[in-house]
């Protein structure tokens, strides 16, 4: 008899609640959970294919270990023995930084990925940390770090209440939203329009989101920081700046006005290809709306001025008084956030505390640019040891980072590599050991990261919908054992990792005067934790210490894991509400509107006023039925319009003799690819678009379906040299390319 089970969807940031149909141990269906407190029944085609994603026959079931150059199936014991034997000698001989850690995007979609990589990093004591953040949102972290003193304090547009949304470089109708967790983002945008609100979309492509908008501004790629600076200029020039209740919490307004003086609408018009009247209109509409929010994503981050653009987004929210007010952009408060400390000055945010070995690139948020991974492995310098061993957890940088061919060779040269990954793919094929996590149906789920970015405060938890298959190991246990193997404790009880974290966390909490457990006995508190295992006990601890928690009895009606388990569709914690000044952790205790590193980067933006690309520039795109590099192996999610083609405007196609459907050769600084053209006026003239995550034609992978229509790796066009200097984020959009008809 089929049964049903609830499961939060892990396939994108929208975190929809699903009702799975399960026959035996197989997921045979998925529909939206109408009673989910947040998603209320919404589901997209990816969620509906949960069963196919979960049951993909190419998923690895048992560990692989390399022997005589070939990967063969092995027991878990053998696999962890090989990890310990491979990593320890490298650490002991060359020191901690010779072990690199690469963390990919799916870590923010798993319980294990939230709870164990920080412990692994601390235990390894390596500075060689590379994550998907530096091909994604690192500019936003840096801008938040500088403005608010906390890299994770990211304001989220109040989608359900705003009167005006200026949406930049994002396409939530395909991506379902990012750094703004909102199940049914499309429905929420339609509701915004239906209640008389205004939607403006800035995107070089006429996307599905742009088609929904009142106004679509087809900006030239890479120039959003200029447009936003000119909008800030206009607000000052026309006396439209109104900080309202933010005023006591903000410093640097006069200095900012001064810095914006060169960025007149006339000065930016040529570079942005947006007329001065339109720039002024955008600023006036923003200031004139009862409430408004500026929201920007990938297209604003993965560009040469990513940090400045991210900063200007919040500058505009601040100058119009829309930060931290309902209908504007607010700071969510998640159930597993740390106990809020009293408002007041903090430690601030530092950049460049150390540098990469080869190019001397500054760290940001403790990370080095993913674009520098290949050189940190393959280039010797007299400034220390190269990376000789690598731990990759849920990461496929051969496809997601610049110059995959070079990285491919670099990975091949490592002394040792271990991948925690369900697939044998372009990256994990280089590993000496592959440790496969179970599929999502056999894993628990809680959105540690996305609840801190959600448009409504709420909390939900799913236990595994299907018991672990015999021979499977939970990803939390895989990562706990990996921590032990990497630190010379191979063979110790993995539960000890959770016990240690719990002891440390509670030990600290009882010493904090603002904590609900101040002065209590940490051992007594640990004894009160409930849960079926280490990860659940840690979740219970975080919930109980958190802003809505029971404080281990201090607030008897507060949250605990037990209470959450009694609410399988989740618990609603209310709309976002103003929180300032509490979230501020700057040294001044205020919002620092013009931080030094930003002021230091503005001359580079001034230079860009004069830039005009000589030829075509490349941008990316996402398809609703895709997810980065790892969902092309599911037949139900491929085909139709989800294809790796080069979108090109008819005028450019005509000029270059490119025919619809014919192959074109695309050349960039890092290499070239040959791909079919799709002539469409969905991209603006001067711009071509290729999706990322394709290029499944390398040998030694096990991706049967994806390999049949592999597509090309757009990131081969990049050589990794183009970065946003403050964040180290890769420039993936607005990249110069040359085109020729392929013969
Ligand atoms: N040109 C271009 N490049 C881009 C982008 C772009 O827009 N344009 N986007 C960038 C962005 S935003 C991102 S986030 C990165 C993503 O870059 P990555 O994180 O490197 O790539 P993903 O394809 O998300 O998945 C990484 C790996 O996770 C594995 N995986 C899936 N589920 C699980 C799981 O439950 N556990 C574990 N351990 N592994 C799992 C997959 O098999 C895959 O190998 O790509 C970036 N690259
Ligand atoms: N279906 C699907 N959903 C996903 C993913 C996926 O791969 N597929 N990936 C997930 C991940 S990891 C992330 S980070 C999010 C990303 O979420 P989004 O940021 O919404 O992602 P995109 O759909 O790539 O939208 C970026 C838009 O920026 C535009 N753009 C490019 N360059 C510029 C520019 O210089 N200026 C401006 N203004 N616009 C520009 C592009 O044309 C594109 O339409 O999506 C997540 N959701
Ligand atoms: S929108 Fe995202 S979270 Fe919701 S069903 Fe689709 S893939 Fe899953
Ligand atoms: Mo991402």
Image (tube, rainbow, N blue to C red):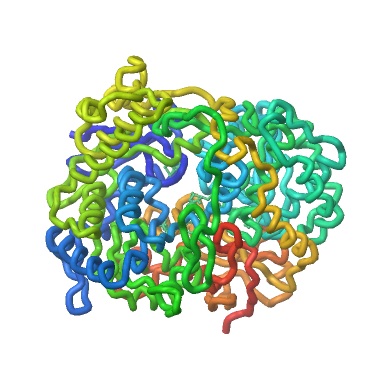
Query: Relative to residue 295, is residue 638 depicted above or below?
Result: below
Query: In the rendering, at what x and y percent does residue 395 appear?
Result: 38, 59
Asked whether 395 or 139 is in front, the reply is 139
Q: Give the quadrant of the C terminus.
A: bottom right
Query: Relative to residue 549, is residue 93 depicted above or below?
Result: below
User: Please, which residue is most extreme toward the top here?
Assistant: 556
Which residue is found at the position 23% from the left and 66% from the top? 88
Query: Relative to residue 186, is residue 108 depicted above or below?
Result: below
Query: In the rendering, at what x and y percent does residue 469 appear?
Result: 16, 47
Residue 250 can be seen, yes or no: yes
Q: Give the quadrant of the N terminus.
A: top left
Judge left or right: residue 494 versus residue 276.
left
**Where on the picture, by quarter, is residue 553?**
top left
Residue 275 can be seen, yes or no: no
Name the quarter showing ligand 1: bottom left
Which residue is found at the position 45% from the left and 36% from the top? 451
Query: Relative to residue 447, is residue 142 depicted above or below?
Result: below
Judge left or right: residue 62 versus residue 219.
left
Query: In the rendering, at what x and y percent does residue 554 appear?
Result: 34, 17
Which residue is found at the position 56% from the left and 57% from the top? 727
Query: In the rendering, at what x and y percent does residue 585 appear?
Result: 55, 38
Which residue is found at the position 78% from the left and 50% from the top? 259
**Where on the picture, by quarter, is residue 443?**
top left
Q: How many labels does the image show?
A: 0
User: Please, which residue is most extreme toward the bottom here?
Assistant: 743
Asked whether 246 or 276 is in front, the reply is 246
């Amino acid at each position: 008899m089929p049964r049903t089970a609830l499961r939060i969807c892990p396939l994108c940031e929208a975190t929809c609640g699903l009702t799975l149909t399960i026959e035996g141990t197989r997921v045979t269906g998925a529909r939206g959970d109408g009673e989910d407190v947040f998603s209320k029944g919404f589901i997209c085609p990816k969620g509906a294919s949960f069963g196919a994603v979960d049951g993909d026959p190419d998923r690895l079931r048992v560990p692989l270990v390399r022997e005589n150059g070939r990967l063969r199936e092995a027991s878990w014991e053998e696999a962890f023995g090989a990890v310990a034997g491979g990593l320890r000698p490298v650490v002991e001989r060359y020191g901690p930084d010779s072990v690199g850690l690469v963390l990919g995007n799916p870590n923010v979609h798993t319980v294990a990925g939230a709870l164990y990589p920080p412990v692994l990093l601390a235990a390894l004591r390596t500075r060689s940390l590379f994550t998907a953040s530096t091909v994604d949102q690192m500019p936003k972290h840096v801008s938040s770090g500088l403005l608010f003193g906390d890299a994770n304090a990211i304001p989220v547009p109040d989608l359900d209440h705003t009167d005006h949304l200026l949406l930049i470089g994002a396409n939530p109708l395909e991506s379902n939203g990012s750094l703004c967790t909102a199940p049914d983002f499309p429905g929420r945008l339609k509701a915004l329009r239906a209640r008389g609100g205004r939607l403006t979309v800035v995107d070089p492509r006429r996307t599905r989101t742009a088609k929904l908008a009142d106004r679509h501004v087809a900006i030239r790629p890479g120039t959003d920081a200029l447009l936003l600076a000119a909008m800030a200029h206009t607000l000052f020039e026309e006396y439209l700046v109104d900080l309202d209740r933010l005023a006591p919490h903000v410093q640097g307004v006069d200095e900012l006005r001064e810095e914006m003086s060169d960025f007149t609408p006339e000065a930016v018009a040529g570079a942005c290809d947006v007329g001065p009247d339109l720039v002024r209109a955008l600023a006036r509409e923003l200031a004139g709306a009862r409430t408004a929010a500026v929201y920007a994503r990938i297209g604003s981050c993965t560009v040469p001025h990513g940090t400045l653009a991210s900063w200007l987004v919040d500058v505009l929210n601040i100058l119009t008084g829309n930060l931290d007010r309902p209908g504007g952009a607010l700071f969510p408060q998640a159930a597993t956030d740390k106990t809020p400390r009293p408002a007041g000055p903090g430690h601030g945010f530092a950049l460049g505390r150390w540098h990469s070995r080869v190019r001397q690139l500054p760290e940001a948020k403790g990370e080095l640019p993913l674009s520098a991974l290949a050189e940190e492995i393959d280039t010797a310098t007299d400034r220390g040891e190269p990376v000789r061993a690598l731990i990759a957890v849920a990461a496929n940088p051969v496809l997601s980072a610049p110059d995959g061919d070079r990285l491919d060779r670099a990975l091949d040269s490592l002394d040792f590599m271990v991948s925690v990954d369900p697939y044998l793919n372009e990256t994990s094929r280089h590993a000496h050991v592959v440790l496969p996590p179970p599929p999502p149906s056999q894993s628990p789920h809680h959105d540690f990261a996305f609840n801190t970015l959600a448009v409504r405060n709420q909390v939900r938890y799913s236990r595994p919908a299907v018991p672990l298959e015999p021979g499977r190991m939970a990803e939390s246990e895989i990562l706990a054992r990996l921590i032990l193997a990497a630190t010379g404790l191979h063979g110790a009880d993995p539960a000890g990792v959770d016990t240690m974290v719990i002891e440390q966390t509670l030990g600290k909490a009882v010493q904090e005067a603002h904590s609900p457990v101040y002065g209590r006995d940490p051992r007594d508190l640990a004894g009160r934790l409930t849960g079926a295992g280490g990860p659940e006990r840690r979740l219970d601890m975080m919930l109980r210490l958190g802003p809505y928690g029971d404080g281990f009895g201090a607030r008897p009606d507060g949250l605990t894991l037990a209470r959450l388990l009694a609410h399988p569709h989740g618990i609603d914690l209310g709309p976002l509400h103003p929180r300032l000044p509490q979230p501020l952790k700057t040294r001044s205790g205020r919002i620092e509107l013009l931080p030094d590193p930003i002021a230091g980067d503005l001359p580079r933006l001034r230079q860009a006023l004069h830039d005009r690309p000589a030829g075509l520039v490349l941008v990316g795109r996402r398809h609703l039925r895709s997810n980065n590099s790892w969902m092309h192996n599911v037949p139900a999610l491929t085909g139709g319009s989800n294809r790796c083609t080069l979108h090109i405007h008819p005028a450019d196609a005509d000029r270059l003799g490119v025919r619809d459907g014919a192959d074109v050769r695309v050349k960039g600084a890092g290499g070239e690819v040959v791909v079919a053209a799709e002539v469409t006026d969905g991209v603006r003239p001067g711009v071509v678009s290729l999706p990322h995550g394709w290029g499944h034609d390398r040998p030694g992978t096990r991706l049967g379906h994806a390999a049949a229509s592999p597509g090309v790796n757009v990131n081969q066009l990049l050589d990794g040299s183009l970065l946003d200097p403050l964040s180290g984020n890769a420039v993936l959009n607005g990249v110069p390319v040359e085109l020729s008809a392929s013969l």
